[in-house]
Amino acid sequence: MTYKTSDNPRHANSWYAASANDKRVRPQLQGEIEADVCVIGAGFTGISAALELCERGYSVVVLEAERIGFGASGRNGGQIVNGYSRDLQTIAGRYGSDKAVKLGAMSLEGGEIIRNRVATYKIDCGLVQGGFFAAFTEKQVREMAAHKANWEKYGHSGLEMVGKDEVSRYVKTDRYAGGMIDRLGGHIHPLNLVLGEAAAVESLGGRIFEGSRVTGVETGERPLVRTAEGSVRANYVLVCGNAYLSPLLPEIHGRMMPVSSQVMATEPLDAELAESLLPANYCVEDANYILDYYRRTADNRLLYGGGIGYGGHDPKDLTSVIRPNMLKTFPQLKDVRIDYAWSGNFALTLTRIPHMGKISETVFFSHGDSGHGVTTTHLLGKILGEAVAGHAERFDVWASLPNLPFPGGRALRVPLTALGAWWYGMRDRLGL
């Protein structure tokens, strides 16, 4: 099948946008309307919250500056990776064992939410079970084994260590010293997932407006959200813009940084070749600090991602950044054409832990999933919905975690973070 990104305007030039099931453009907000809840942002966090609230019987309006899934939700690697960007042992060391136990109890829920919604609403997003974490060195293998043992204390029973002689069952390459599989992981077409969830919101009476960038938020007992052509008066506002949130709310804007990651998709491969590269059809993520991630698509492409750009800056030639790493893993693809290459920003926090909280008693926010957004956004969106419904126990756990600004403010956050990434990248290269 030949796909055209021009059929899906205002999206990135991605395989996802070109192969989306639903390319309808939703209307722009016009005039003044009211709702129980106004959600800012139609990515995974906002749509997850909206769906939770619609299922509870609330009237919900979602405002999206561009298109549903325009940001990281519709551009990411499509991998269901459980947990958070920092492991539970680190969380326990920072915030105490009580917090680690509570966050650990939620750490597998994001993937559960995805699987349940796919089944409940019959969302066609190519869901495939299973993920493989690849280790380059024996040190990384030992770290994975320790991570597995720690996670099992919190109830994760789907992990299994893989020796070097077993790697070829999951990925045909000689780069890895071993690894770990997660039977509760998996992969999906992320744009089709968020579009399917958005359709579920609409089926329950929720209203979604695209091309409706928020120009102002008036907090108060009944906050008002303004766009260029209209406004929404609501009882609650949920701010879910993440890396693409405009600097309207200084209380949160300086506490996250947009970071770009690059992805490309090959031409469709011969089915036998595609299967030989990834025999179990698991998605793969390596253990380096600046990691590579890849998987097969439903039409037998290899989708390969990696690279990083602090401040949301991209290299001029995306393919030149990713393709060399792909060829290190699969040199047999040296003559394969690259059909799509794109980038997308995710929101990074200083702690690498998501921030949740309140700007006022009626305006809540969630952002900064720091590279683990596919599952975490689904969990935190659901928790936002719970909080609005008066069940804020889990929201309060997240809101109690430190919400720290980057040192040096916005001027120094990029160079300082890039310096840290250079150090950890050097350690990866030296095998330290």
Image: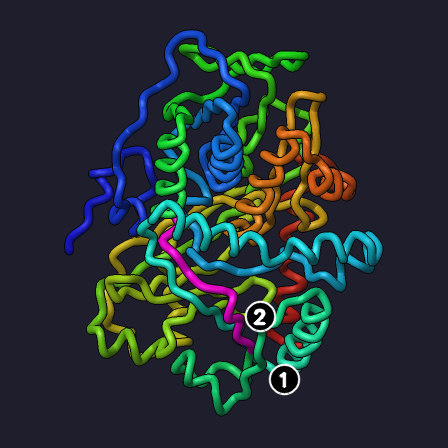
Image quadrant containing the N terminus: bottom left
Question: Does 50 appear in magenta?
Answer: no
Residue found farthest to the left: 1
User: Around disc 2, counting alpha carbons within 10 Å, would you say few (fewer than 14), some (14 to 19), or many (20 or more)?
Assistant: many
Residue type at the position of mark 1 = Glu
Give the image quarter of residue 272. bottom left
In what element is the residue under mark 1? Answer: helix
Left or right: where does residue 408 sit relative to residue 278?
right
Q: Which mark is residue 287?
A: 2
Numbered label attached to residue 138: 1
The image shows residue 259 at horizontal and vertical percentages of 54, 46
Q: Which residues are magenta?
A: 180-190
- Where residue 144 sits, quadrant-wise, is bottom right
Q: Is 99 located above or below residue 48 in the figure?
A: below
Residue extending furthest toward the bottom: 165
The x, y position of residue 22, in whole percent, is 27, 40
Amino acid residing under circle 2: Ala
Residue 36 percent across, percent down from the top left: 54, 19
Please identify the residue farthest to the top as the structure is shown: 31
Helix, strand or loop under label 2: loop
